[in-house]
Amino acid sequence: MARNPISGDGLQDELEFLLAEVNALANRLKSATRAVHAGNNLPVGAKTIFQTLAQVGLQTVPQLARRGSFSRQNIQVLVNRLEAGGWVEFVANPAHKRSDLIRLTDQGKRLLATATEREASFLAGLLNHTTEAEVLSAGKLLTRLRQLLSGSEPMRVVHFPK
């Protein structure tokens, strides 16, 4: 991807380039994830739901949505698909009559284990092309940018004259 020669601001150009690369990487990662999980009928986003339920325990749809910064509606559609597949189940929520808790089934736990193994094999191939320092540095930068964009960290706004 070509740098922006118009702005003349090297750091801004590099940030624009980085964000374009993040977008391109996200698209490639979606394709790669579909390929890694081909054959197991795992819907996109399901592994994140499975991991959350395995690590945190029972959750409601709104809790899952907040945790992953997704819309409640998108998580509800995904959870309904996962329930239809037998990978999660709804259980009564004693704290809220209208918002059931979601639990990972044994079948869902097995699928999570398989998905985790497949992804580990996939990632092992990428590890040969980077260093721990690069991965840690990139992770910190992307986390900070995400926090700035989500409003969870104050961002200094520059106002340009009209």
Image (cartoon, rainbow, N blue to C red):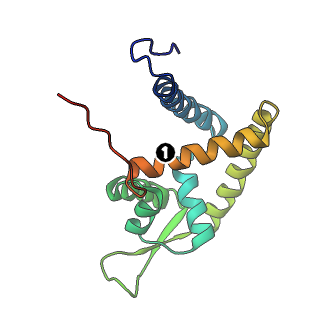
- Residue marked by disc 1: 145
Point out the residue furthest to the front here: 161
Q: In which quarter of the image is the C terminus?
A: top left
Question: Residue sitting at 25 percent across and 32 percent down?
Answer: 160
Residue 156: x and y in percent read 37, 47
User: Is residue 105 visible in this depiction of the protein?
Assistant: no
The kind of residue on which mark 1 rests is Leu
Q: How many labels does the image show?
A: 1
**Which picture quadrant has residue 78?**
bottom left
* Nearer the observer, 34 or 70: 70
* Nearer the observer, 43 or 15: 15
Q: How crowded is mark 1: few (under 14 residues within 10 Å), some or many (20 or more)?
A: some
Residue 27: x and y in percent read 51, 30
Residue 85: x and y in percent read 51, 56
Q: Looking at the image, is 141 positioned above or below residue 65?
A: above
Q: Looking at the image, is 31 positioned above or below residue 152?
A: above
Point out the residue furthest to the bottom here: 94
Residue 154: x and y in percent read 39, 55
